[in-house]
Image (cartoon, rainbow, N blue to C red):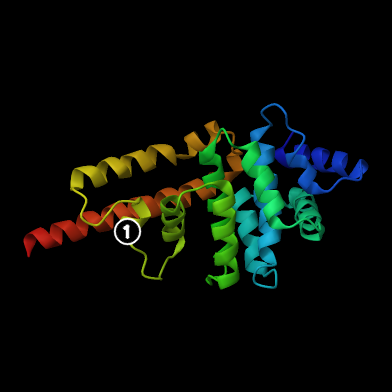
Amino acid sequence: MSIWSRISEAVAALVARGEALSAFFDRRRTPPERSVAFTIAVVSLGAKMAKADGQVRPVEVAAFRDVFQIAPKDEAAAARVFNLARQDVAGFDIYARRIARMFADQPNVLEDILEGLFYIALADGRYHEGEESFLTAVAEVFGLSPQAFACIEARHLEGRGRDPWQVLGVPRDAEMATIRARWRELVRTHHPDKMIARGLPPETVNLANARLSAINRAWEEITARKAAASDA
């Protein structure tokens, strides 16, 4: 059974009981099926974020497909989750708090969710102030540190003066040994296999690859700058 088939079953059960999509994150007294929970979390918060800049653009919808590699046969199920969340009168903070409780024992998954939201928000090449405020608020509800938020944000600010030191979350005056250790830690943490081990669906491999690419580019840029400075 595909992940979207499992999601369709979960959503159908909620609808049959007359419950909102946000109720999905309340009923898990034991560890949930993480891949289903992660996917619903990103799609539902993404639907709430779509209101942040006033409209849903085709490129943002395409970003959903890119993050989750949604097959044509599964698009209806994904659209159903998106529309249920968008129509729910509950505010995004209610979703975010419930998701934070669900993944309280896995803070890395909360960072994964925020990463997926950034990917979608910046798919159109714009970083709307409403989206920035939304993402900042979600990070605060998730209990993520300002440094963690800054690292994720910096990874996505392609062409906007992205600071490679900030991407890696190290100070500019850090020794190369410290920077190298941090880079290796990030590569280990964000490897696709590690994400799947955290319970994320294999369909999110595009997200993991994009994140690793940004981390490696930051390391290469810092290395090149350090080498140029030593040769000067």
**Image side of residue 100 versus residue 148, left or right:** right
Give the answer, above or below, for where 13 lies relative to 172. Answer: above
At horizontal 77% and vertical 34% (from top left) the residue drawn is 27
- The residue type indicated by label 1 comes to Pro
Q: Quadrant of the C terminus?
A: bottom left
Taking depth in this image into account, of 160 and 48 the one nearest to the observer is: 48
| Quarter of image, res 180 | top left
At horizontal 39% and vertical 37% (from top left) the residue drawn is 188
Q: Quadrant of the N terminus?
A: top right
**Image side of residue 164 versus residue 143, left or right:** left
Asked whether residue 115 is in view, the answer is yes
For this orientation, the residue located farthest to the top is 30
Asked whether residue 70 is in view, the answer is no
Taking depth in this image into account, of 187 and 69 the one nearest to the observer is: 187
Image location (x, y in percent) of residue 104: 59, 36
Dot 1 crowding, Cα within 10 Å, few <14, some 14–19, many 20+: many
**Residue highlighted by disc 1:** 164
Give the answer, above or below, for where 208 lies relative to 214. Answer: above
| Quarter of image, res 181 | top left
Image location (x, y in percent) of residue 145: 46, 49
Image location (x, y in percent) of residue 66: 60, 55
Badge count: 1
Image location (x, y in percent) of residue 197: 53, 31
Q: Secondary structure at mark 1?
A: helix
At horizontal 53% and vertical 70% (from top left) the residue drawn is 127
| Quarter of image, res 157 | bottom left
